[in-house]
Amino acid sequence: MRGPRARISELPGDCPVTWAVLGANVLTFVGSFMAGMSWSDLAFFPPSFLQRPWTAVTYPLIGTGGIVWVLIGGYVFWLFGGSLERSWGWRDYIVFLVLVSGSSAVALWLASVLTQRDALVAGFGMPLAAVTVAWAAINPFERVALYFVLPVEARWVGILAATAVLFSLPFPLGVFALAGCGVAWWYVRQGRYGLVRPAPPHPRRRLERTKRSLTLNPIAWYRRWRLRRQFMRLVKGSKEDDDDTLH
């Protein structure tokens, strides 16, 4: 297959929607940094939500927070979001991103009406937290290399991501912003099976993904190291049993 779609499918991780979100963040960040471009029409602001309803799902496309956040946050988004997209398929993944982004925005709009407090929202911070919560709900006991060094179970990483959302906005707006994380948990546990019908995985595609292992994934590194260590223990134990039998 040739053309733009072929090039997109060849990107590392086989997750075109995740790459599209990251690409939009990079482009908007570079545009703001180099040309001073304003993306206010895409940012979410509760008082103007009814006049610009599309901002409920466009604010994650704006690259904000500095180059360090764009790089590290983008890597984590690619790591967890790409895993969800490969598992669910790009259609289900788009539904998920729209739900978690929109639910946080609507909850913040409701908080603004009730409390008369406002906050401008831009960047993929809240969707990233929702993606992390969803991945942690699916793999609660999987070990993740936190800060690329400290091995932590995924369930604690999900709690940490939700806590970051809670304190990212003034009280009580952060409490309402947790709606996205709550929807992510619901979508994984029940919502996905009622809203969309999961498509069966294609066996040939799964074989291709197995061959193209992702060497940039620290979770994969740790999993391979653990499996290799277990294998060596089994081999060592079988050799000792053979020695006892000979003697």
Image (cartoon, grey):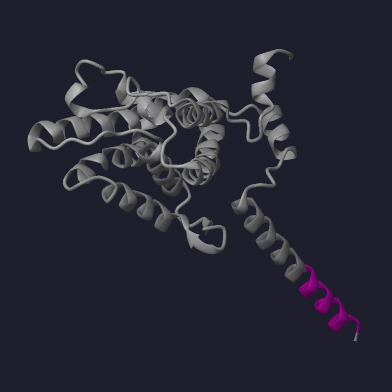
Dominant secondary-structure state across the stretch colored magenta: helix
- With respect to residue 233, does 217 lie above or below? above
Compare residues 111 and 200 and report the one nearer the observer. 111
Figure quadrant of residue 103: top left
Q: Residue at x 41, y 41 (%)?
A: 65
Residue at point 69% right, 61% down? 225
The residue lying furthest to the right in this view is: 246
The span picked out in magenta is 235-246
Q: Tell me if 201 is positioned left or right of 174 in this view.
A: right
Q: Give residue 221's position: percent from left, percent from top.
A: 66, 55
Does 77 sit left or right of 113 as displayed?
A: right
Numbered label tally: 0
Residue 96 can be seen in this image = no
Residue at 35% x, 33% y is: 122
> Would residue 245 be counted in the magenta stretch?
yes
Q: Quadrant of the N terminus?
A: top right
Q: Answer left or right for 33 relative to 46.
A: right
Q: Is residue 158 magenta?
A: no
Query: Looking at this rendering, what residue extends furthest in the top direction?
Result: 3
Residue 226 placement: quadrant: bottom right
Q: Tell me, yes or no, if residue 136 can be seen here.
A: yes
* Horizontal and vertical percent position of residue 51: 21, 15
